[in-house]
Amino acid sequence: MTAAMSRHRTTDRTDHLAGPLTGPLTGPGTVRLTGRTGFEIELLAPPGGSRADLAEELARGCGGTVRRFFHTDSEPSLVPGMDHFIHLTPGFAVVGPDGEERCRLVDDITIRFDLDPAAPPRPGWYRIVGDEPRLMRLTARLADPAAPLEAVLEPLAAAFGVPAQVVEGVVRVEDGGGATVAMAVPTSGERERPCEIVTPPLTHDHQDRLAQLLEPAVRLGFTVPAEAAVHLHVDAAPLREPATFANLVRLFSDWSAPLRAELGTNPRCRRLGALPEAVVELVAAGVPDRWPDLVGAVATSGLTKFADVNLTALVHPRREKDTVEIRCLPGSADAPEIAARAAFVERLLDRCRDPRPLPPWRPGATAGDLIAPSPSGQVR
């Protein structure tokens, strides 16, 4: 390890950690959530370890098995004229003895600070990259995630009637016209260490089930990386009302600063931000009364998933993940802490479903004031 890398590794990063839970986030004992909630929790394996290690440990703990799969994501491209690459990276599903998935462990490209970018590829770890979504979906269907790098693209090559080319450790498939379809390349820079735990929707015992995943991770030396966040996925269907949509926008725009303060949002977290100004202005002017009309009005607003709240599936339902994603919770490996923040968010979302508009933020007000009982006993 170089001196510069050593300094990089020992830099004090405590400023990214959430502060102590306060106000409505506190409470003794186990936190009870009532809704279907999926969790995405970003962790980092210790040096020399990988997310595969945690998958094996979790499988042993529940008497289950590990199933490899390819996780699809995208990353910025340095190639002129190309905005981004799509890549497939090694993912690990922990399957219980009943055949049900307990969780999935995948890479997260936003996790970078704690990694050594000069680390050489680890044997057996690679990614598949391409630039055309349909071809990459085909690749994911044809490629065997357990195959070695040299053989993983052979089924894709056969589909195009060409041989896979291997040059200096890189496997490439070209179509009959010489255009690249996909490439498989070794992964360097410790990309095996990022580990995002993705749970299925949990409907009961949320805190206990999170603890079953996180306590083994902590025992293995997994830590919370500098850029970490926790994401919540809640069912979109109950929120698909114009008044609720308007309140969600108010919560994550007018009330954004106090909400971030109360949750302890990590300032180093990537891919967070404000909702598009066009959406905020639409709500300020008054949303349409009918949901289809609202969807049409939002169509050109520039709504994106990379904000404190991801409302894209709310207005454009997705069969595979019909959720609203809350992205501004801080990273944590503590199940009670995560459950407490999730319960707080759950109460705020319940308030958003109340057709009464959220009040404008006023100086000194906290996000907890939105759900605190008033002197008359009514929630504000």
Image (cartoon, grey):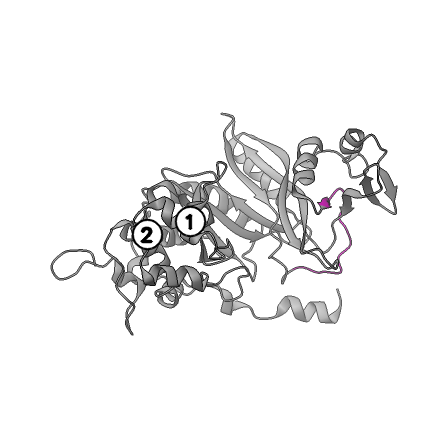
Q: Secondary structure at mark 1?
A: helix
Horizontal side of 364 relative to 263 (left or right) equals: left
Res. 280 image quadrant: bottom left
Residue ID at (28%, 69%):
365
Residue range in magenta is 115-129
Classify mark 1: residues with Cα within 10 Å, few (<14), some (14-19) or many (20+).
few
Q: Is residue 311 left or right of residue 58?
A: left
Distance of label 2 from label 1 (alpha carbons): 10 Å
Q: Are marks 2 and 1 in contact (CB under 8 Å)?
A: yes
Report which residue position mark 2 lands on. Answer: 288
Closer-to-camera residue (206/85): 85
Q: Is residue 80 magenta?
A: no
Badge 2 or badge 1: first in the primary sequence: 2
Residue 2, horizontal then vertical, whole percent = 76, 68
Q: Nearer the viewer, residue 322 or 194?
A: 322
Identity of the residue furthest to the bottom in this view? 363
Location of residue 334 in the rendering, given as x and y in whole percent from the top left corner: 45, 52
